[in-house]
Each structure stands twice: as C-alpha cells, then as structure tokens.
Amino acid sequence: MANSYDVVVIGAGPAGYVAAIRCAQLGLSTACVEEWINQMGEPALGGTCLNVGCIPSKTLLESSEHVHRLHDVFPNHGISVKGLKVDIKQMQARKDDIVGQLTGGIAALFKANGVVWVKGRGRLLANKQVEVTDHNGKTDTLQAGDIILATGSRPVELDAARTDGDMIVDSTGGLNFTEVPKRLGIIGAGVIGLELGSVWKRLGSEVVMLEAVDQFLAPVDEQVSKEALRQFKKQGLDIRLGARVTGTSKGGKLVTVNYKDKDGDHAIRVDKLMVCVGRRPCTDNLAALEADLLLDERGFVHVDHQCRTNLPGVYAVGDVVGGPMLAHKGSEEGIMVAEIIAGEHGAMNYDTIPWVIYTNPEIAWVGKTEQALKTEGIDYRVGSFPFAANGRAKAMDGAVGMVKLMADARTDAILGAHIIGPMASELIQELVLAMEFGASSEDLARTIHGHPTLYEAVHEAALAVEGMAIHKINK
Ligand code: FAD
Ligand code: NAD
C-alpha cells in the first residue's frame, strides 16, 4: 500500500522530528505529518522550538546581551564605543536567517534519513490510520504500524487580555517586534516573560511584569529565586507579584491594563502587552471520536512512563503529554519511543532533566530543590560556592550568584544542583552527567577541574558539602 508506513509521526517539533529520524535510523519506514507554515508562508519543520521558541529567543537574547555589554560592561574594561547604533530590523533578520538555516537543516536530515515529510494537518483515526488534510483542503489517509503523536503546545490565552497580533501579543509576537516598545507590559513572570522581558529591557524598553502569584519563580530553588528577583530588580525589570489582571482596553496607541493586588486596584499604560501565562497542549481535534484517545482533565494526552497512550501502538511525546515543557525532554521521549517501537530497550531518566532560564544571570538546575527535599523529609547536606570568589567569573564581569549542591546525608549521592550565574546553562551539564552516573558529591570534589574556569565553582560547591571549600570561609 503506497501510503503505508511502519511509523507515522504527527508533528515535527523537537519531539516529533527527533522520533522520526531515530525511527528511520532503526530501519523503520517513517512519515512525519507537519502543518506548520512559517512567516514566509512556506511549510516548515522544527515546531515551536525552532520557529518561535528556543532558537529565536536565544538568538535575540544573545544580540541584546551584546548591547547590554557595550553599554554597561565594556566601560568597566576601559572600552568605549561612540555612536553606538542598534538596528532592530537587522537583528530580526539575523534571527530569521538562523531559524531558516536550522529548520532547513531538519528538512535535509529528513531527506538524508529517508523520512517522508507529509505537509498538512494530521488527525488520528481508529485502526492505526491517520487522516491528513493538506493546505489546499485535500485529504488522504495513511496506514501505520505504529503512531507517535507529537503535536506540542500553544500559548494559554487570557480572557482579560485577548491577543490582537499587534498591541496585545503572545510570545511569538514578542519575538517579532520591529521597534523597541517604549513601555512593555508582560503578563506572567515565568520563563518566557523573563527571557523576552530581558531582551526588550536590554534594548531600551521600560518593562513592567504582572505576575499573579506571590511567589517568584515557584519551581526554582527558593534561595536561587530570591537571588534572581534581587538581580532582575537591580536591572530595572519592574516585577509586580500577586498582581491579577482584571481587564485591558485599547485607546489611541496605548493599552491600559487593569490589575488587582493586595493593595487594591491599579492600572498601567503600555505600548505593547505580551501575554505569557503558560502553554496548553495541542489536542483540539487531534483524534476522531471513534479513535477513543484518552486525554487527561487538562487536555494532555494520557501516557504511561514509556509514553504509551491508552491505544495499542499509539504513543505520544513532548509538550502534548505534559511534564516539563522542554525541547530536550520531548526529544529524549521521541528517541525512547522509537527504540521501543523498533524492539529495543527504550528508557528515559526523568530525574535528570536539566532546566535553564537564559536570563542574565542565567539560572539552571537539575534534580530536587531544597524546599522539595524538606517537604519529602529527605536528610541532605548542602554545599554552595559564590561566583564572587571565582577568578574566571570576575574576569568575565560575571561574579554574581552561586552554585549550590545538595547530597544525600547518608549516601552522599547528589540529589539536586542549582546554579545562578554566568554560563549556568553550560555548567549544569556537568551535574546532569554526575547525577546520571550516580555520582556522589565526593566524586565531584575529587575530580580535577581546570583553572581558571567557571567549573571551579562547581568543584568548590562539591567540596563545601564536606565544609572543605578552599576559597571560601566554611561555616
Ligand atoms: P512543538 O515544538 O510545539 O511542535 C509540535 C509540532 O506539531 C508543531 O510544528 C505543530 O505545527 C505540529 N502540529 C500540531 N498539531 C498538528 C497536527 N494535527 N497535524 C500536523 N502537525 C501538527 N524549551 C527548551 O528546552 N529550551 C528553551 O530555551 C526554550 N525556549 C522557549 C522559548 C519560547 C518563546 C517558547 C514558546 C518555548 C520555548 N521552549 C524552550 C519550549 C519548547 O519550545 C517546547 O518544549 C518544545 O518545542 C516542545 O516540542 P514538541 O515537539 O513537543 O512540540
Ligand atoms: P511559565 O509557566 O514558565 O510561566 C507562566 C507564569 O504566568 C507563571 O509564573 C504563572 O504564575 C503566571 N500566570 C499564570 N496566569 C496568570 C495570570 N492570569 N496573570 C498573571 N500571571 C499569570 O510559562 P511561560 O513563561 O508561558 O512558558 C511556557 C513554558 O515554555 C515554560 O513552562 C517552559 O516549559 C517553556 N519554556 C522554556 C524555556 C527554557 O527552557 N529556557 C524558555 C521559554 C519557555
């Protein structure tokens, strides 16, 4: 049968395209159905991550960090630049070019691995069939041996602040401003709000962030989130906690945002308003009723620990199944499922998924927070080390924040690691590896770290678990 494949994947984000490539590598005939149309009106692979997520946001963070360094850091090095100009259109063009290169790269990988890219919207039918509706409305049916659902997520919308693609936008709009908004309002001081808020703040916007809950960055270790809040406020991000948006209105060229906090009702006026209050799974009309796919109460596809849905031979991976909404988590699930389908041993360690927030300072962690260890009644020891005592961090003008490790009081196994500081996104990987290999804090403390490096702060934090840090007064 011409339209029959060993595996049909629906969705080509980092969960789906990685699953498809691994299936093909393992000798399975594979098709991947993807409906994305990019800014140029062309079909594109890569999903949220490559098109409107990880890659464009990190590209703008990098560009805006250069501006910040030129303004605020270089003078300290005795370097000054006169007549500094920032061309937002060029910055955006560079970002779009990088996105184009990477999404094009996935198309090349599909071709090289023999993955068939089916352009259109996929819908799960009964009996392992997938209906595809192409961009002209024509439908076709694919027959699969196994099916992987990887349809990802989209921004949660707020009734009180409906997006209009111009003055009130979601994260995609917030990545595409062609001018620096004079005053930018952000609803939600979570990961996206902080990353994109940092971009536009560094480029000159006044940024006001309205966060509904009282606790800043609730999933983060409390010691780290306190330090982060202090640093972000110092940078001029106006973060208002416990602020519930009650309504918005547009007048002239401004958006008025009404919100309530413990002190009463307030209003702010902004040029642009960005709504980033979380993401929800793309499961609307994903499956025909007769397919009988089980969703949970929040609309995520229900899966077991190996990403099996309630239907034999149908798996789901990535944001659409919930858990951490992270590209690398989805990709690893994709690999696990491909290996299971191919009859191999697919497994994934959910305890060692790293998290990174690409602000300045960066925030990264793996494993348990101190508050979780306390709640779970686990006996632990802590070691921490400040970047203020790290030579490389000082040379880089990054002597802010710390590395904090927690180890089991009995076995010394590393239970959690938390970093706020320069290049935390890279440093965390040593700790992910250590945890994956079941290392103890002593293993890390006995590992030789090059000098002068930021990694020495990780080493010293491991030494500090035993009160043995060299460049810190251990109390
Ligand atoms: P997606 O990437 O959402 O891909 C799903 C794909 O399925 C899409 O291409 C969609 O078009 C397609 N699709 C949906 N329904 C259908 C259908 N019925 N038929 C055919 N195709 C369909 N994560 C990180 O780890 N690091 C970061 O730095 C990071 N930064 C981010 C920044 C922003 C601004 C945003 C919004 C997200 C960021 N994320 C980051 C999160 C990351 O993008 C997601 O976790 C990741 O993309 C999820 O991968 P996925 O494959 O599950 O879903
Ligand atoms: P988030 O969950 O990180 O933050 C949303 C914030 O909005 C929370 O603090 C929440 O309390 C707040 N909020 C919810 N409703 C609100 C309301 N009505 N008014 C005001 N505040 C409200 O979600 P996000 O920032 O939208 O990002 C979505 C997901 O995308 C993240 O959870 C993460 O998984 C992923 N992501 C990851 C990265 C990264 O890995 N660096 C970057 C961006 C996004």
Image (cartoon, rainbow, N blue to C red):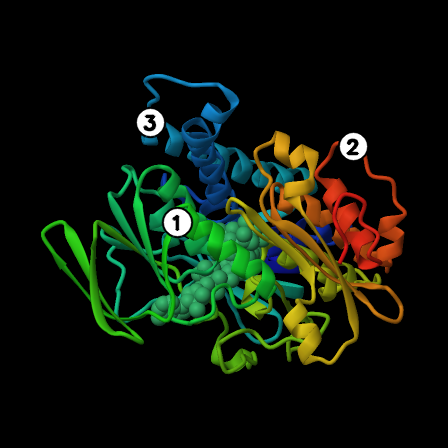
Q: Name the residue at 53% across, 60% down.
A: 226
Q: Name the residue at 40% across, 57% down.
A: 138
Q: Earlier in the sequence, mark 3 or mark 2?
A: 3
Q: Name the residue at 60% across, 40% down.
A: 399
Rounded to the nearest angstrom, the CA distance separating label 1 from label 3 is: 19 Å
Rounded to the nearest angstrom, the CA distance separating label 1 from label 2 is: 34 Å
Residue type, label 2 = His
Q: Circle 3 sits in a helix, a strand or a loop, which is it? A: loop
Spot occupied by residue 44 in the image (x, y as percentages of width and height): 48, 44
Q: Which residue is mark 3?
A: 87
Q: Give whichever of 204, 122 is nearer the camera.
A: 204
Q: Around disc 2, counting alpha carbons within 10 Å, would you say few (fewer than 14), some (14 to 19), or many (20 or more)?
A: few
Whether residue 159 sits left or right of residue 250 in the image: it is: right
Q: Which residue is mark 2?
A: 451
Q: Give whichever of 358, 161 is nearer the camera.
A: 358
Spot occupied by residue 343 in the image (x, y as percentages of width and height): 82, 63
Q: Around disc 3, counting alpha carbons within 10 Å, would you say few (fewer than 14), some (14 to 19), or many (20 or more)?
A: few
Spot occupied by residue 336 in the image (x, y as percentages of width and height): 74, 61
Residue type, label 1 = Gly
Camera-nearest label, 1 or 2: 2
Q: Looking at the picture, does residue 460 appear above or below residue 144? A: above
Rounded to the nearest angstrom, the CA distance separating label 3 from label 2 is: 38 Å
Q: Which residue is mark 1?
A: 197
